[in-house]
Amino acid sequence: MDRFHEMQVFLAVAEEEGFAAAARRLKTSPPSVTRAIAAMEQRIGTQLLARTTRSLHLTEAGQRYLEDCRRILAELDEAEEAAAGSYSIPCGHLTVTAPVLFGELYVAPVLGEYLDRFPLVNINALLVDRVVNMVDEGVDVAVRIGHLHEPGQQAIKVGEVRQVVCAAPGYLDLRGRPLRPEHLREAKIVTSSSSQLVSEWRFVDGDQPLTVSIEPRLVVTANTAAINLARLGWGVTRVLSYQVAAAVAAGELEIILEDFEPVPLPIQVVFQRTGRVPAKVHTFVDFLNRRLGQDAALNPAMRQRS
């Protein structure tokens, strides 16, 4: 067995924390994985993995060797991709992640345009409402809302969104328009359990932070459900501005308490910048940057010009 393959086996065992899981990942048998690790430890002359009947963990030497394996295998991949021309011609498999609703509304249309432009690229779009670990899940490009990137990653701001409180005009005509955030305690609140602000909504009053404790009458699992209930006149909800831009423009929802909104959150396109950036990555980042940067719902300057 060649050393590069042994390194791939060791990396899989370390990341999956088990021989059987590593075998499934590598599409091979657990005994072959066990033999590869044993041969590696015998050749190197030191124990890399401490094993018991219930657990497996890296020794100190194993931890150092794991870091070296990752570096060496990454350099090998880079060399092969360079030889194949992937740094000059967009080609291969591209994995992209974005929040669900943002991805459906803004990223998905761009994916189709990009694929038509670059026929040698295939895309896997991971639309989930969680922060995906780009290295662990093999993600090339991520769209983040907020200051969510790690060292070694480059982030390009392509827009911003506000945290808005809104309700149907009919509901507000009937129940009254809150003049201050504290008045929301008297409103019927519907919110999503995917939001981090289910029980506390943060505002600013002048230059001072202001937090209002909220007791939602209704909690749903998706932002779209909360928005639809607000559109139907059931109550008040708080979401990100892009999520209700179309409903606000159509007069179905009205934004309230705008003077108390916190600082807008940046929309950022994030990618790894640890070496040469493949053509598929930098062309997609440039493509997404141009498209999202031209959207008036995401860029206040565009709204002012329009």
Image (cartoon, rainbow, N blue to C red):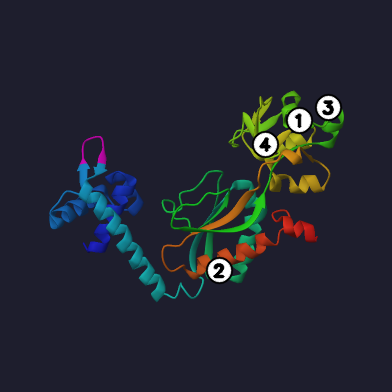
Residue under pointer 1: 235
Instruction: From the image, give the main secondary structure of the stretch colored magenta.
Output: loop
Q: Is disc 3 in contact with disc 1, using a CB cutoff of under 8 Å?
A: no
Dot 2 or dot 4, earlier in sequence = 4
Q: Residue at x 62, y 30 (%)?
A: 200
Disc 2 marks which amino acid?
Answer: Thr
Residue under pointer 4: 203
Q: Is disc 2 in contact with disc 1, using a CB cutoff of under 8 Å?
A: no
Disc 4 marks which amino acid?
Answer: Phe
Please tell me whether mark 2 or mark 4 is closer to you in this view.
4
Residue under pointer 2: 283
Please tell me whether mark 2 or mark 3 is closer to you in this view.
3
Say few, some or many: other residues with alpha carbon within 10 Å of mark 1 (under 14 / 14 to 19 / 20 or more): many
Examine the structure image and report whether residue 52 is included in the region drawn in magenta. yes
- Is residue 168 depicted above or below 48 in this figure? above
Q: Residue at x 33, y 67 (%)?
A: 76
State the separation of the CA atoms marked 2 and 4: 38 Å
Examine the structure image and report whether residue 166 is included in the region drawn in magenta. no
88 lies left or right of 43: right
88 lies left or right of 6: right
Q: Residue at x 72, y 31 (%)?
A: 181
Q: Which residues are magenta?
A: 51-56
Please tell me whether mark 4 or mark 3 is closer to you in this view.
4
Please tell me whether mark 4 or mark 1 is closer to you in this view.
4
Q: Which mark is residue 175?
A: 3
- Where residue 261 sits: x, y (%)? 70, 41
Please tell me whether mark 3 or mark 1 is closer to you in this view.
3
Quadrant where the C terminus sits is bottom right
Dot 4 or dot 1, earlier in sequence = 4
